[in-house]
């Protein structure tokens, strides 16, 4: 019969304790909670909408004032806002 070492399990427990202590506390209390990667953050949407509004303002200002750098920064900021709307994996 093979003898297994507990070192990989101990390192996994230490990493979980460091990464997401709320998940570990809920798991030890018997009420599992979703890990941090799967929890939804409602404040992330607000930031995404703010960045999108600023991007639209920069884009329109770049069109009204014929300024290519302002127009390009509005397009880049819109791409960043689109990335912020995606839920974390």
Image (cartoon, rainbow, N blue to C red):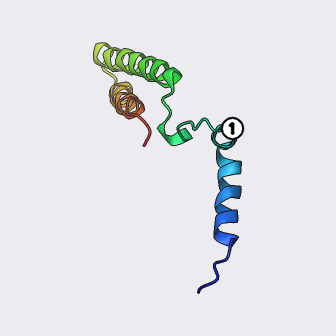
Local crowd at mark 1 within 10 Å, few (<14), some, or many (≥20)? few
Residue 85, given in percent of the width and then of the height, sits at: 38, 29
Q: Secondary structure at mark 1?
A: helix
Residue 59, given in percent of the width and then of the height, sits at: 33, 20
Q: Nearer the viewer, residue 84 or 17?
A: 17
| Quarter occupied by the N terminus | bottom right
Residue 83, given in percent of the width and then of the height, sits at: 38, 35
Instruction: Identify the residue under disc 1.
Output: 29
Residue at image x 37%, y 33%?
Answer: 86
Residue 13: quadrant of the picture: bottom right
In the picture provided, is 86 more to the left or to the right than 10?
Answer: left
Residue at image x 52%, y 37%?
Answer: 34
In the picture provided, is 80 more to the left or to the right than 5?
Answer: left
Residue at image x 71%, y 57%?
Answer: 14
Image position of 26 with respect to 4: above or below: above
Residue 50, given in percent of the width and then of the height, sits at: 46, 17
Q: Nearer the viewer, residue 48 or 20?
A: 20
Looking at the image, the residue that sits furthest to the bottom is: 1
| Quarter occupied by the C terminus | top left
Q: Nearer the viewer, residue 79 or 7?
A: 7
Residue 22: quadrant of the picture: top right
Image position of 40 with respect to 8: above or below: above
How many marks the image carries: the answer is 1
């Amino acid at each position: 019969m093979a003898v297994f070492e507990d070192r990989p399990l101990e390192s996994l427990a230490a990493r979980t304790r460091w990464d997401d202590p709320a998940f570990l506390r809920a798991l030890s209390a018997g009420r599992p909670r979703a890990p941090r990667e799967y929890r939804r953050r409602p404040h992330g949407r607000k930031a995404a909408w703010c960045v999108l509004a600023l991007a639209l303002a920069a884009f329109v200002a770049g069109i009204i004032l014929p300024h290519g750098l302002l127009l390009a920064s509005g397009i880049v900021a819109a791409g960043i806002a689109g990335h912020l709307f995606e839920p974390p994996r």
